[in-house]
Image (spheres, rainbow, N blue to C red):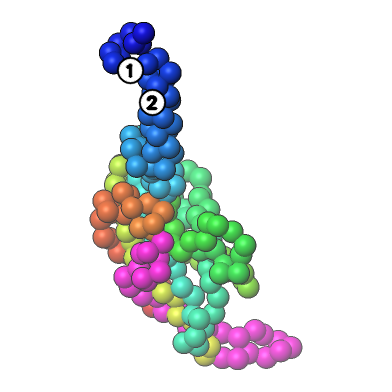
């Protein structure tokens, strides 16, 4: 007797074919061939979550290098950003190449309240660089690529071991984000990076 709804097929054969179709569909779904939506990058999810909670938040992208006597002094790990009003924010800049983590990255991706933000400290694995360096203004909902801050420190007086420490002349410039930072940000947050406006940090003129 033929199965109901499947004329001409014995019940057992119809059941086996139906089971095979279900298994094939599940297999394709797991492999991603018929996935209903593409997986969203972690950085884009971070930005979306921040904006769901605070719709007026903007996003700031940047990186910083600290040089000493024309050579790289250290890899900055964090920066402290201070607003005109409100709480300071600790922003991750880079992870060390030797860190055992699957989330190695370069370049800051920071959802922030709108306003004017000043970088007041940069932390390296060796030491901290303190003092206002650069500043940028973010409008509500704006995504800003503020560039690559390069801090060049040149020793002008070695000082004296017993009476005083060395003195440095400091010069700051803004460049395009390094290729490694761009690649990292595009991988972590491709949607956010694609919408970013290029606006350089303003440099603290007292340093130059």
Asked whether 8 or 71 is in front, the reply is 8
Q: Using the rendered view, name the quadrant where residue 125 is placed.
A: bottom right
Residue 194 seen: yes
* Magenta region, residue range: 157-184
State the SS at label 2. Answer: helix
Q: Which mark is residue 147?
A: none
Residue mark closest to the camera, 2 vs 1? 1
| 130 up-or-down from 144: above or below | below
Residue located 32% across and 49% down the image: 192
Asked whether 26 or 81 is in front, the reply is 26
State the SS at label 1. Answer: loop
Measured as percent of width and height from the top left, residue 103 is found at 53, 56
Q: Using the rendered view, name the quadrant where residue 108 is placed.
A: bottom left
**Marks 1 and 2: in contact by CB < 8 Å?**
yes
Name the residue tied to disc 2.
17
Name the residue tied to disc 1.
9
Asked whether 196 or 173 is in front, the reply is 196
Residue located 38% across and 26% down the image: 17
| 186 up-or-down from 176: above or below | above
Measured as percent of width and height from the top left, residue 208 is found at 39, 78
Residue 117 seen: no
The N terminus appears in which quarter of the rendering? Answer: top left
Residue located 51% across and 49% down the image: 88
Question: Of marks 2 and 1, which one's residue comes earlier in the chain?
Answer: 1
Measured as percent of width and height from the top left, residue 157 is found at 56, 91
Dot 2, crowdedness within 10 Å: few (<14), some or many (≥20)?
few
Residue 21 magenta-highlighted: no
Residue located 33% across and 53% down the image: 190
| 40 up-or-down from 7: above or below | below
Dot 1, crowdedness within 10 Å: few (<14), some or many (≥20)?
some
């Amino acid at each position: 007797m033929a199965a109901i709804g499947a004329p001409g097929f014995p019940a057992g054969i119809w059941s086996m074919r139906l089971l095979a179709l279900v298994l094939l569909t599940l297999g394709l779904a797991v492999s991603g061939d018929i996935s209903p939506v593409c997986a969203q990058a972690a950085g884009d999810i971070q930005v979306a979550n921040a904006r769901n909670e605070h719709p007026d938040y903007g996003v700031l992208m940047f990186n910083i290098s600290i040089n000493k006597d024309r050579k790289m002094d250290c890899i900055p790990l964090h920066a402290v950003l201070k607003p005109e009003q409100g709480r300071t924010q600790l922003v991750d800049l880079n992870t060390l190449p030797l860190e055992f983590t699957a989330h190695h990255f370069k370049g800051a991706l920071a959802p922030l309240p709108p306003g004017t933000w000043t970088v007041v400290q940069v932390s390296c694995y060796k030491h901290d660089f303190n003092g206002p360096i650069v500043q940028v203004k973010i409008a509500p909902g704006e995504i800003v690529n503020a560039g690559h801050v390069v801090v060049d420190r040149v020793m002008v007086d070695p000082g004296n071991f017993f009476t005083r420490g060395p003195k440095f002349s400091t010069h700051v410039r803004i460049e395009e984000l390094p290729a490694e930072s761009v690649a990292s940000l595009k991988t972590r947050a491709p949607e956010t990076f694609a919408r970013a406006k290029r606006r350089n940090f303003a440099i603290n003129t007292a340093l130059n």
